[in-house]
Image (tube, helix red, strand yellow):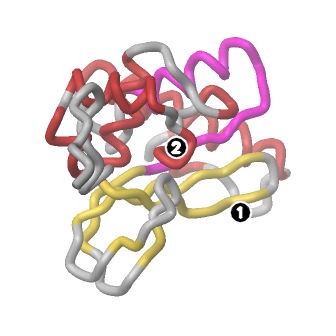
């Protein structure tokens, strides 16, 4: 039996929090070393950097890709995730709250591109598409034009204005 399977149902809440943090740290180590465990390297780095500083933060318990069986709202761009679309779902906790974060794959990729350029959102997390400014969109375009056009369909590429007719 693993240490994670031995948590008692009657354990104190603080023990449960420590157990979850230990499990997340193990998943982060696996993600960094093996590229598995369902956590992106950016999420693993976020958790570990906060954990070393001891800050309060959002903890990502799990992430996975799903095919939408019903319509959802992307938490990054606030647009609809249509039925049949592959999207990323993350289960998160912070203090006593827990929620599910859903995002288009392209929105997740845009945030990861900016993460790689040391551009962060609130609480040192991936920046949301809705919060990206013109300069951020330019960085996304220069790194991955396809992601840019998926996230902002119909918008001209930075530095390539459309003619007014």
Decide: is 72 above or below 160.
below
Q: Which residue is mark 1?
A: 9
Residue 4: percent from left, percent from top: 52, 44
Q: Residue furthest bottom?
A: 70
Kind of element beneath mark 1: loop
Disc tally is 2
Q: Which residue is mark 2?
A: 128
The part of the image, by quadrant, that contains residue 89 is bottom left
Other-residue count near label 2 (Cα within 10 Å), few / some / many at <14 / 14–19 / ≥20: many
Question: Which residue occupies the foreground of this view, 63 or 86?
Answer: 86
Q: Nearer the viewer, mark 2 or mark 1?
A: 2
Question: Which residue occupies the foreground of this view, 67 or 144?
Answer: 144
Residue 144: percent from left, percent from top: 19, 30
**Residue beneath the point at 63% across and 35% down:** 21
Q: Is residue 45 magenta?
A: yes
Q: Residue furthest front?
A: 165
The part of the image, by quadrant, that contains residue 145 is top left
Q: Is residue 115 magenta?
A: no
**Residue beneath the point at 35% across and 35% down:** 40
Kind of element beneath mark 2: loop
Decide: is 78 above or below 73.
above
Q: Which residues are magenta?
A: 42-62
**Residue beneath the point at 36% across and 48% down:** 107
Q: Which mark is residue 36?
A: none
**Residue beneath the point at 23% across and 71% down:** 85
Which sits earlier in the primary sequence, circle 2 or circle 1?
1
* Quarter in which the C terminus is drawn: bottom left
Residue 42: percent from left, percent from top: 42, 27
């Amino acid at each position: 039996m693993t240490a994670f399977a031995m948590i008692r149902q009657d354990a104190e809440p603080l023990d449960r929090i420590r157990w979850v943090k230990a499990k997340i740290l193990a998943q982060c180590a696996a993600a960094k070393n093996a590229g598995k465990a369902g956590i992106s390297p950016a999420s693993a780095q976020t958790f570990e950097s906060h954990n070393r500083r001891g800050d309060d933060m959002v903890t990502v318990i799990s992430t996975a890709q799903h095919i939408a069986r019903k319509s959802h709202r992307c938490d990054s761009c606030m647009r609809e995730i249509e039925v049949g679309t592959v999207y990323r779902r993350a289960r998160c906790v912070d203090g006593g709250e827990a929620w599910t974060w859903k995002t288009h794959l392209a929105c997740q990729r845009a945030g990861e591109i900016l993460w790689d350029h040391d551009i962060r959102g609130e609480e040192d997390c991936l920046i949301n598409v809705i919060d990206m400014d013109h300069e951020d969109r330019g960085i996304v375009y220069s790194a991955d034009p396809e992601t840019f056009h998926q996230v902002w369909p119909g918008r001209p590429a930075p530095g390539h204005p459309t003619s007014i007719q």
